[in-house]
Amino acid sequence: MSKLLPVDPFDIVVFGATGDLALRKLLPALFHRWRDGQIPDNSRIIAASRDSMADSEYHTLANTHVDAAPDSEDWAAFCSQVRYVSVDATKTGSGWADLKDRLDPDDNKIRLYYLALPPALYGPISAVLKAEGLCTPNARIVLEKPIGKDLESARDINRAVCDAFPENNIFRIDHYLGKETVQNLLILRFANWMFEPIWNSNGIDHVQITVAESLGAGKRASYYDTSGALRDMVQNHLLQLACLVAMEPPASLGSDAVRNEKLKVLDALRPIGPAEISRDVVRAQYRSGAIEGEPVAGYTDELGKESETETFVAIKAAVDNWRWAGVPFYLRTGKRMSSRRSEIVIQFKPVPHDIVGAGRLHPNRLVIRLQPDEGVKMMLMTKDPGPGGLRLRYVPLNLSYADTFEENYPDAYERLLMAVVRGNLSLFMRRDEVEAAWKWVDGIIGAWDQESPNLYSYAAGADGPSEADVLLKLDDREWFDGARY
Ligand code: BG6
């Protein structure tokens, strides 16, 4: 039986259609959904950017990142739904008439305006969409992260976009929320009875969230240099993961039910200010090194200039509420680390009494591997079978996605695009969530500005600087590395 949920016909306008995000992620995602039969025939895909080019030239460009031969029947059929339009989206007038011509004249049709553009343009483009009469009842605007670069700019953007679109028609993307394993977090926690009674400071010692990348800043170095790991990854992806781990059970999976609970977590994050910054936060930048035996350049060599931007950050965070009192959340993310892996580790407390003998019991640990090798491992103490005394082993109860589920599942952008068409807001960030996340992150940035703590360095291919290990050692803990289980 097909697992495809059909969606209503829609028109999507991708602004910034010649940019990296559109070409690498959005067009391939649309093509895959089309190939699976999920995009109705009377839907239209309109690629918009300032360059002038013919439809056929855009089709050729778009094909570079799609797994379909340019002369295949599939690709030709998909392209019959893809038109290109040259428009300066920040100004009314030129180009907009062409764009409107390509849209379905039915004002009640679902429309998506996807802004694959820098956040500074979100406000101006929303104003132009409104002035051009394009904010129709079923028009939805899709915004990529980052929404701004701090709380103030995020508020400005939100205000400007909300002036043109009602909040329920604004879809702020954090693509981590579209990942299969991230969505499974809610199910794992709230559709299984066994975790919830001990999912608190009685049962949990601490939480670790690691998002490690082996890639460097690469071609995005000039953007990345204005952002750094804290703004690029922590403000959104890592905090969203922390919310899903820490939130109270929502009454339903309804969008406001879920987002209200996430917001409470963000609001409960203990501020990190100048007094805490050197103790609770480690920032670092990669220098040259090697990954899987291949030499790689340092960050400033890639960038071509000196820089104080962090490519790694580790934070000891606290959620100040009843459930999490005294339970640290250690967050860590970096580029050019030893391997690409995202995982959440829930470290449970030791059993209250050791019946076996001191030092032989390891506390349970739940490891949720988000990518790659998606899966969930519960580390348990077991008796090593056989005669000769009581030997114990710490072994995983292992749910591997690859072994358990046969099918390939759509990537995050495919899922999120279809969720916008369906109007499912629960996978997107609400205005107040984005602002609450910035408020906490701004505290850290402000403390960095004021205190100028050390920017440490780590060799590309290492898992961050040794100071990040010290952050945990001071609490008598260590980072768990999935490879070691
Ligand atoms: C993006 C960041 O949001 O997420 C990138 O801007 C990062 O710097 C990327 O590389 C990581 O996403 P994923 O899905 O590869 O883990």
Image: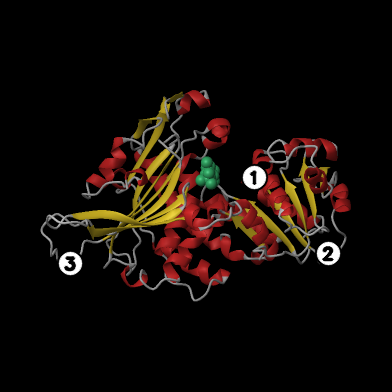
Q: Residue furthest front?
A: 387
Q: Residue at x 23, y 54 (%)?
A: 393
- The Cα atoms of the two marked residues, 3 and 2, are separated by 64 Å
Q: Residue at x 46, y 24 (%)?
A: 297
Q: Earlier in the sequence, mark 3 or mark 2?
A: 2
The residue carrying mark 3 is 352
Figure quadrant of the N terminus: bottom right
Tell which tag, 1 or 2, sits nearer the viewer: 1
Query: Residues at badges 3 and 1 in contact (C-beta under 8 Å)?
Result: no
Q: Residue at x 57, y 65 (%)?
A: 426
The amino acid on which the numbered mark 1 sits, given as a three-letter code, is Lys
- Which one is nearer the viewer's eye here, 16 or 37? 37
The label on residue 462 is: none
Query: Residues at badges 1 and 2 in contact (C-beta under 8 Å)?
Result: no
Q: SS class of the residue under badge 2? A: loop
The residue carrying mark 1 is 25
* Mark 2 crowdedness (10 Å alpha carbons): few <14, some 14-19, many ≥20: some
The residue carrying mark 2 is 107
Tell which tag, 3 or 2, sits nearer the viewer: 3
Q: Residue furthest bottom?
A: 251
Q: SS class of the residue under badge 1? A: helix
Q: Residue at x 22, y 46 (%)?
A: 474
- The Cα atoms of the two marked residues, 1 and 2, are separated by 28 Å
* Mark 3 crowdedness (10 Å alpha carbons): few <14, some 14-19, many ≥20: few
Disc 2: residue Cβ within 8 A of ligand 1's nearest atom: no
Disc 3: residue Cβ within 8 A of ligand 1's nearest atom: no
Residue 52 shows in this picture: no
The amino acid on which the numbered mark 2 sits, given as a three-letter code, is Asp
